[in-house]
Image: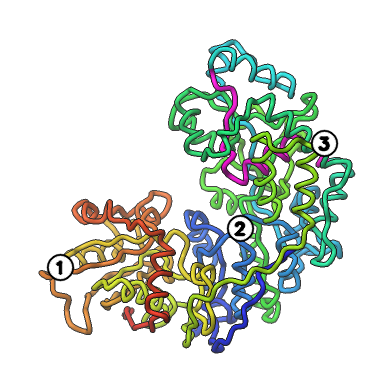
Amino acid sequence: MKKRILSMVLVFAMLIGMSGCTGSNKNGKIKISLYMWDKNMTRQLTPWLEEQFPDIEFTFVAGYNTMDYYSYLNDHGELPDIITCRRFSLNDAAHLSDLLLDLSETELVGSFYENYIENNRETNGTIRWLPMCAKVDGLMANKDLFDKYNIPLPTNYEEFAAAMKVFEENGVIGFMSDFKADYTNLEIMQGSAIPELKSLEGTMWRAEYESETEDGQVGLDDKVWPVVFEKFAQFIKDANVTPEMTNLGFNEVAEKFNNGELAVMRATANDCVLSRQRTGQNAVMLPYFGETSEDNWILTYPILQTAVNKKVSENKKKEEAVMKVLEAIFSEEGQRRLATGTAVLSYNKNVNIELSDSLSEVKECIEKNHMYMRLASTEIFSISNTVGQKMIKGELGPKEAYEEFNKLLTTPKSAKEEEILLTQETAYEYGLGEHGNPAASSVLNTMREGTDQDLAIGFWSTATTSVYAGKYTYQQLKWLLTLKAYTNECEYTGKEIIRLMEWLINVKEDGSNPIRHYNDIPTTSGMEYTIKNNGDGTYTLENVTINGQPIDENKIYNILLVGEYDCIVSEVYCNCPMPEDLYAKYIGHETEVKYYDYFINAAKKLGQLSAPTDYVTINK
């Protein structure tokens, strides 16, 4: 089994180090870098952390949701202090184990329900990863449709199968789901047989699988997993899952559900909340059904898993600060702020998150602690999708599916030689300095120069790592650019560009602040700007120049706008909508090329990532 991407032979310059990796800054503040699996962590959690810890200088980076990304960072000595990831298993994280702190003896670990934290215990007893908040996955039902056809909500599998039959007889779609997605195949396959997977045999097999080594691969057992495939095959039959569903995405299915055309679909409790809000329908979550109501379970998975870089223990004050930050994140208030209205449960005994109305029908499962944490290694995701789709298409029966799944799980994976797209000669550090972030500047300069634009503005976040000297594959170049850093090509006058910069920097009349964290100060290319640090977490634009001269307010410039617009305008982020006349020139100009390919194509064209420039001056 391939545990990690094989390291490329890299020749790279030794960097000073990313912002957040040293113990403290020149102001005496402790520096802590927290890499986030997704921008959602910046809604309420990160501003709250800065308020709680004024003596800490945080570097928040919206990175990538994969262990391979962190392996890549570690290869270059830039593993952050606090790591978060959503797609997780001990199996996938094994190669990082020696780099992370053992948290098993901390008070924080003692705050978890034992049966959930045990999923993260390694064979030697260490616990390096902590699960944050449980997303709830199950069957979302339109209770209004059930009532319309006088069908009681099912309480066991037999009643579920009977309800599906009655709906079909009445010309209503009983069940449909997005089997195009790997997670749907994985979750329904496991959800069909949770009692078996939670049995002693199932638990022992999972522990063995999670602790396997590269030269000791673990296949499926011959007691639990044959039943998993038999029950999944039965679900496919009883729920009338058709081959066409293997081509359906979530939005297509959700539209039918929200339009009242569909009785049941696989979804999360948060999907259920959103459906209730948008349609007014009485949508509720149902469990994955067993033979009796005593065998019903809900499937859960953490919003994220978090771990700590072992290097923080080299500085006692920093280690203490990191642990205080973790304690805050896992407190009741911290989990509420991280969830931000999402319907979740907690894995911690001392955290009480009020149940959403969407969970009313699975309250008994929750009270019985019938919450199964999915097995979700990268290969299990992939194989579940491959085998699940073949079962739905009728190409495999349960026995054949078991055999193919086992074969894919145990067949050694050959190392794939990845194409080298360019060899970078010079390294550029990540982290905001006196005149900008060199790595972010390099990325944005590459995009502007490689597309022959006059100017470029990267708002919110543009880069996630330092630019390393050495060979770059497609994936490694992709990791340089922040996820969903969408690209728009626009035309603005110099005067409008000044107003754009004011929108991205100045605090608004209602107090909304577009720069929620100092390290998210906009990056520019082809122009420079000066801002004043107001000393209270806000900034004011003072001037915009090109090559040191005031920008020509009457000239029309071709400009790239790079970033995720939602992170500026949404109420749950900065709540700073773009002025309407400027937005009219922005909307509808997204390039057809995917945002990361836009950057990668520019880099390939130039053959090198461009040198950074001093693009900002911050006055006090």
Extreme residue toward the front, this view: 395
Image quadrant in which you'd find residue 93: bottom right
Q: Which residue is mark 2?
A: 329
Please give left or right for residue 106 compared with residue 497 in the image. right
Task: Indicate how the structure is coloured in the image.
Answer: rainbow
CA neighbours of label 2 inside 10 A, class few (<14), some (14 to 19), many (20+): many
Assess whether residue 524 is covered by the magenta stretch.
no
Question: Who comes first in sequence, dot 1 or dot 3?
Answer: 3
**Residue in the image at 69% along x and 22% along y:** 160
Rendering coords of residue 583 (x, y %) = 24, 53
Please give left or right for residue 119 compared with residue 461 in the image. right
User: Cα distance, mark 1 to mark 3?
Assistant: 67 Å
**Residue in the image at 41% along x and 75% along y:** 603
Q: Is residue 373 above or below residue 4?
A: above
Residue type at numbered disc 1: Ile
**Residue in the image at 49% along x and 30% along y:** 276
